[in-house]
Amino acid sequence: MNQLDPRLAAALRPRHVAVIGATEDRNRVGGRPLHYLRSFGFAGAVYPVNPKRDTVQGYKAYASLEALPETPDVAVVAVGGDHVLDVVRQCAARGVRSAVVMSSGFGETGPEGMQRQRELVAQARSLGVRLVGPNAQGIANFQTGAVLNFSTMFMEVAPKDGPVAIVSQSGAASVMPYAMLRERGVGVRYVVASGNDADVSVCELALAAAADPEVRVLLLYIESLADPAVLAEAARVAHARGAVVVALKSGRSAHGAKAAASHTGALVNDDTVVDAFFESHGIWRVADVHGLVNAVELYLACGLRPAERLVVMSHSGAVGVLCADTAERLGLPLAELHGATVQSLTRVMPGFATAQNPVDLTASLLSDGSMFARTLDALAADPQGDMFMIGVPVAGEGYDVAGMAADTARFLIATGKPVAVSAPQASVREAFRAAGVPVFAHETDALAALHQVSRHALLRDRVSRRDSLPPAEPVTFPAGSGPLLSEAASLELLGRAGLPVAPYRLCGSVREAMDAWQDLGPDTVVKACSGAIAHKSEHGLVFVGRRTADEVAQAYEECVARVRAMKQPLEGVLVARRVRGQHEFALGVRQDPLFGTVVMVSDGGKYVEALRDFAVLLYPFSEEDVLNKLASLRIAPVLAGVRGEPPVDLQAVARAAVALGRFAAANILSIASIDVNPLIAGARGEASWAVDAVIERAGANHDQ
């Protein structure tokens, strides 16, 4: 478990602050933090360091850190890049243990700047000083007024303390969501922009923000994820007290790591592993800054509550239809209202209104304002309604907007279920927002927020239900220095790990091959077995449908002759029972240096690389996690059974994937990658079999 560094906790909630490079001009980097500290009510001590002035912005100035009357908890460094190393030495000598380095000219400028950055970090670590930055916009805590940040945004958009924290590697990506939330009236406690992340990472700062018991929503912007274990701990800390973590990770187009002999290495790029990491730890990933803030009000009003079925209510039939269309696109099923609910609605609404879902109150709402509350009362009792979308396309004079907002607020509190309102008129939105109801200008945004919160809750529930499996026992690998284990050795290890391996026999002579056919036949597959040959079918080393002893003998001799012609070592010839099933899958593993054991599940066969219909999981995961991933594949409708075919036994595939991940994680220092292709799955209740497999050793000589 990663512990919060107390030096970072002090930087977020300092009592004494030094500003090195302090200036009278509040529009310069060295002047803006001083202006903010005074303007936003920081009650601690502020020590500007400027040897040329007696005072700076009304604060007594000091010629050096050494001259300060006490040791600051944190120093803001706003000097030229060439002076930063010397300032860090001065901080260490004065006992300052954390610094926000706003100075630029480091890793963001190229190779020479990167070298200066490495020297800076090495020096700071040797002296025991933690650095936020360099090139950092800084830290802002609007609860205490400790705004050690130079962004202009706080001059333009007034801050207000609240239950949201924003932690970002980018200055702009920290203040954009801040401004959008403040426009909606949502308070923000922390805005942190870490810059180059040379020492203190965005993940460590996220952990520091997650430790605040009043932060209920943690928003992250991440460009590079260098220490995922710390972010996992931040998510755990947040989730333990009911807070949520939402992340925007840029770089979806990054190239994946390569693995020489594994399909997985070719298919799984870094970004899909990041997706798997977020899912594994209950972090919701969004695509853009709008997505980062869109659901915040709903999180704050409703928390995380698993929900499946949606009820739409409006006094416009068109809005109801549009919402139904959007809900279907998002995968939000509309609830079938209970018969008793329909009867109640019929008594409330005029005869020409629609007492079904979507519920259409019609323009009669203008003449009978009580219909709004009575409709909500009827819907509140319906067991099918998990979440509610209320469209208010038009309101104003003649409508009791304040009453509608109050009624919706009572409904939200009484049911405890997610409720979102859409209203294009700003005055209407203001009324609902004042009542504490999540409100959006567009129904599309409202439904997207409902989708996010409900599916995030389902994800969190799935993570919390995940059983912790005891680790598998590490195994001893066969002797040898080649990068690949042979098929026989790979299948033997995977069978011991719990995968269902098709019956086979490794043979060293024609006689042994014929005896194997006698035991395993009559329909067999004959394959050359050599760790030096990864893809046997490409070299004519796989013979399918050998049904007689003579055919098996002939295939054996062909295998031996062809491998000798290739001048490759031959471990023997594999005779295996030919198995059939409903569908072929591929399973793969690669060991990621940052994230650990990554498992791929995909549609199988020889077209796996071309079709790219795959899903990725990060171990540990559960069979339920695998089933959810399988449901996301394009091939999923076929797996469910079509044209009279029975459904595929996906539970068997899930068991195999979990067993594979457990085995690979237990041998993470020995295994680089694993391919199981195909895994032939039967219909439900029938057997499933791993037919072919290759294990790649970790650290093997790939030039052999």
Image (tube, helix red, strand yellow):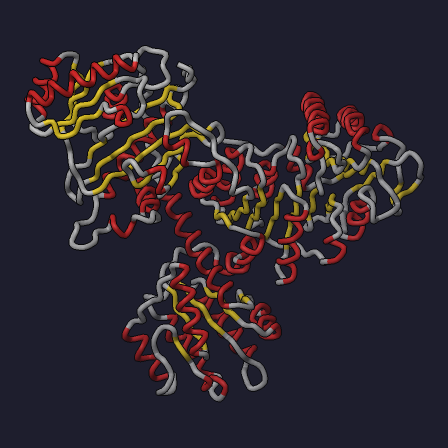
Q: Is residue 91 left or right of residue 7?
A: right
Q: Is residue 472 visible?
A: yes
In-front residue for pair 339/312: 312
**Relative vertical location of residue 568 with respect to residue 225 in this rendering, above or below:** above
Is residue 277 or residue 299 the one in the foreground?
277
Q: Quadrant of residue 492?
A: top left
Q: Give x and y (percent) for residue 42.
A: 76, 48
Q: Residue at x 72, y 58 (%)?
A: 158
Q: Residue at x 36, y 14 (%)?
A: 482
| Residue 392 image offset from top left, x and y in percent | 51, 75
Judge whether residue 129 can be spotted in this image.
no
Query: In the rendered view, would you say 353 is above or below 60?
Result: below
State left or right for residue 216 relative to residue 508.
right
204 displayed left or right of 683: right
Q: Would you place residue 359 above or below residue 39 in this image?
A: below
Q: Residue at x 21, y 39 (%)?
A: 681
Q: How many marks?
A: 0
Residue drawn at the location 45% of the way across and 60% of the way down = 450
